[in-house]
Image (cartoon, helix red, strand yellow):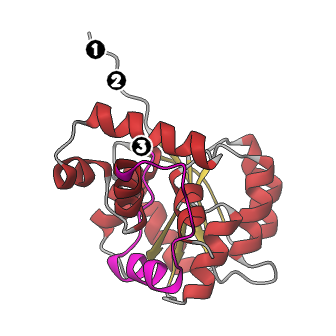
Amino acid sequence: MPTKPKPIQVAIVEDDDEIRANLTHRFSRSAPFRLVSSYPDAESALADLPRHTPDVVLMDINLPRMDGVECVRLLKSKMPEVHVIMLTVYEDSNRLFKSLMAGASGYLLKRSPPAKLLEAIQEVCSGGAPMTPEIARRVVQHFRQPDLPSLTARERQILDQLAKGYRYKEIVNNLNISMGTLHTHVAKIYEKLHVHSRTEAVVKYLNK
């Protein structure tokens, strides 16, 4: 008998009771996922999350007292392997940049369709950085590319695709390369830029 894949462990940090309840209900009906914990504020999340070791944390950016950006920063210092997706009503570029610099792996608007949220969780676990197209465009518009002389032309192409929010399977199709070749290039990009994730690479590529 084939081994059943382990469900993706998800935690929620959201101060709105109704939204938190809706998210909880959504994950209770989605077989590939398992909700391990949920919290109404950053303080309780920071105190309790490390013992649950989730794969992905859905983080509201506008929490009471300590905001979601600072919560991400402190959480990543305790749990560097955890992926954090910011869920927010804001399309504020400053909040996006602060979230990415704090260690967030993705950024979605709360009005995103349920299917998009579940897809984003799977994507981030596969090394992606899910963002809405609007947010990806803002990232590109607000930063300029620095001098990165050590990157080859193909590596720059791939990094540009990553910065625009394309998923790996889309990059493979866009550049007509294999998934294995893409992973090889991405590994070399990470090594040359001295980063460990797609988000860090994109921020370094786009940052002034």
Between residue 171 and residue 175, name the one nearer to us.
Answer: 175
Side of 124 relative to 16 (left or right):
left
Magenta-tinted stretch: 127-153
Residue at 36% across / 42% down in the picture?
32
Residue 40 x %, y %? 68, 72
The reply to whether dot 3 and dot 2 touch (C-beta < 8 Å) is no
Point out the tag, 3 or 2, that comes first from the N-terminus. 2
SS for dot 3: loop
Please tell me the numbered disc located at residue 204: none
Count up the numbered dots: 3
Residue at 49% across / 37% down in the picture?
187
Classed neighbour count for the residue bearing mark 1: other residues with Cα under 10 Å, few (<14), some (14–19), many (≥20): few
Please tell me the numbered disc located at residue 126: 3
Classed neighbour count for the residue bearing mark 3: other residues with Cα under 10 Å, few (<14), some (14–19), many (≥20): few
Q: What residue type is labelled 3?
A: Ser
- Is residue 110 visible in the rendered structure shown here? no
The reply to whether dot 1 and dot 2 touch (C-beta < 8 Å) is yes
Residue 146 within the magenta-colored segment of the rendering: yes
| Residue bearing the label numbered 2 | 4
Separation of disc 1 and disc 3 at Cα?
Answer: 21 Å
